[in-house]
Amino acid sequence: MNKNEPLKFKFHIKTGDTVKVISGGSKGKSGVVLKIDTINYRAIVEGVNLVKKHVKPSAQDPQSQGIIEKEAAIHISNLMVVEPKTGVPTRIGRKLNSKGKLQRFSKKTNQFI
């Protein structure tokens, strides 16, 4: 590993997971994870933590709308994975599956995700 390369960690959420916000201004909302920023411990979730951005018309988009709403990043500690089968938020653990590979599992139902 190069010393100039930033560290990358494993998180309890992945891109494509359905998550629920457990604290902050968007508490109670849920959505799909679009992107994860591993360096800053943040994730962008669809339809959550919407902010208004003022967009100036440019050469590529001369008919710009002026003010648009887009998703802002939210800290990963404020997110909890929603179990796909039951639809309830759950904590995540890792354990070996039958093939000997580490896989995520729900601590609420003890089922693999």
Image: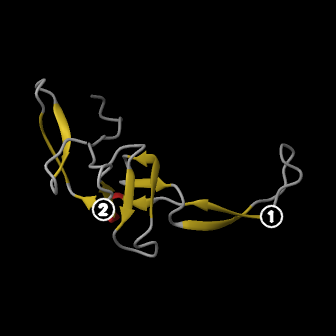
Using residue 29 as the reference point, say whether residue 111 is left or right of it: left
In the rendered view, tell whether residue 49 sits above or below residue 38. Answer: below
* Residue 56 visible somewhere in the drawing: yes
Give the residue at x 44% y 67%. Answer: 29
Of all residues, the one furthest to the front in this rendering is 86
Residue located at (35% from left, 44% from top): 14
Identified by mark 1, the residue type is Gly
| Percent coordinates x, y for residue 17 in the rendering | 38, 47
Give me the residue at 83% from left, 43% from top: 60
Q: Which residue is mark 1?
A: 66
Above or below 74: residue 16:
above
Going by the picture, which residue comes out furthest to the top? 99
- Label 1 environment density (alpha carbons within 10 Å; few <14, some 14–19, many ≥20): few
- Out of 70 and 27, give the one closest to the viewer: 27
For the C terminus, give its image quadrant.
Answer: top left
Does label 1 or label 2 sit earlier along the sequence? 1
Q: Which residue is mark 2?
A: 77
Q: Quadrant of the N terminus?
A: top left
Q: Position of residue 48 (x, y in %)?
A: 50, 63
